[in-house]
Image (cartoon, rainbow, N blue to C red):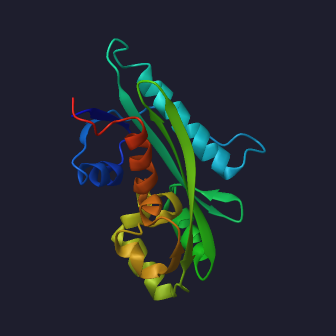
Amino acid sequence: MNKLILASGSPRRQEMLSNLDIKLEVIPPKSESLPNPDEKPWEYAKRVSREKMEEINNKTDKSKPSFILAADTIVVLKNEILGKPENIQQWQEYLEKLSDTWHKVYTGYTLKCPKKIYSRVIKSKVRFTKISHDQLEWYISTGEGTDKAGGYAIQGKGAVFIKEIRGSFTNIIGLPLSEVVEDLNKCSFFSLQ
């Protein structure tokens, strides 16, 4: 079976792909990019995923065909990108902004196959319930959202804030599995060797 190089340190992405019995080699990229002026959020997510893929591709053995997957997930509220909170105050501000409203989650991913590169952006929409002061304090005390875009984990305790979603659930976690597997199939990743 083929091996997939995952250009990400995300435990969530690793778990989702491992659940599909995909043999993984994890090589987290070191580069961090900021949005360019006038760059739309979805363009930013797509560009960053491509940059991560290229960084890891430059480190791999070119004599062997390789499959490399890189992704970048962002939370966007009214065109403002809510990244990983830098401190507790920013985390609290994020959750207050997301309370009782819709926001978008974009995951840009780039899949390099031996003969082709697929690069896509998948959008999901998430509606939060109104978060009370007590709920906010409780969630902050869990520490769960400190390393997550937007400051929450939909697959964890943060699920209590989710009133409705439209689109891919796995996209919100960090990887749109349906689309990724579709592209892996296109480049015969699952074929026996």
**Residue situated in front as seen by the camera: 11 or 88:** 11
Q: Please name whichever residue, 57 or 114, is drawn nearer the observer in this view of the structure.
A: 114
Reply above or below: 26 against 65: below
- The residue lying at 42 percent from left, 48 percent from top is 182
- Give the total number of marks visible in the rendering: 0
Residue pictured at 50% horizontal, 57% vertical: 149
Q: Is residue 181 left or right of residue 128?
A: left
Identity of the residue drawn at 78% across and 45% down: 38
Taking 135 as reference, is 119 left or right? right
Could you tell me which quadrant the N terminus lies in?
top left
Any part of residue 17 in sight? yes
Residue 32 appears in the figure = no
- In the rendered image, residue 85, in percent from the top left (x then y), is placed at 51, 58
- On-image quarter of the C terminus: top left
**Which percent across, then down, holds residue 71?**
47, 44
Residue closer to the observer: 34 or 107: 107
Up-down: is 111 above or below 135? above
Q: Quadrant of residue 98?
A: bottom right
Q: Residue furthest right?
A: 38
Q: Nearer the viewer, residue 61 or 99?
A: 61
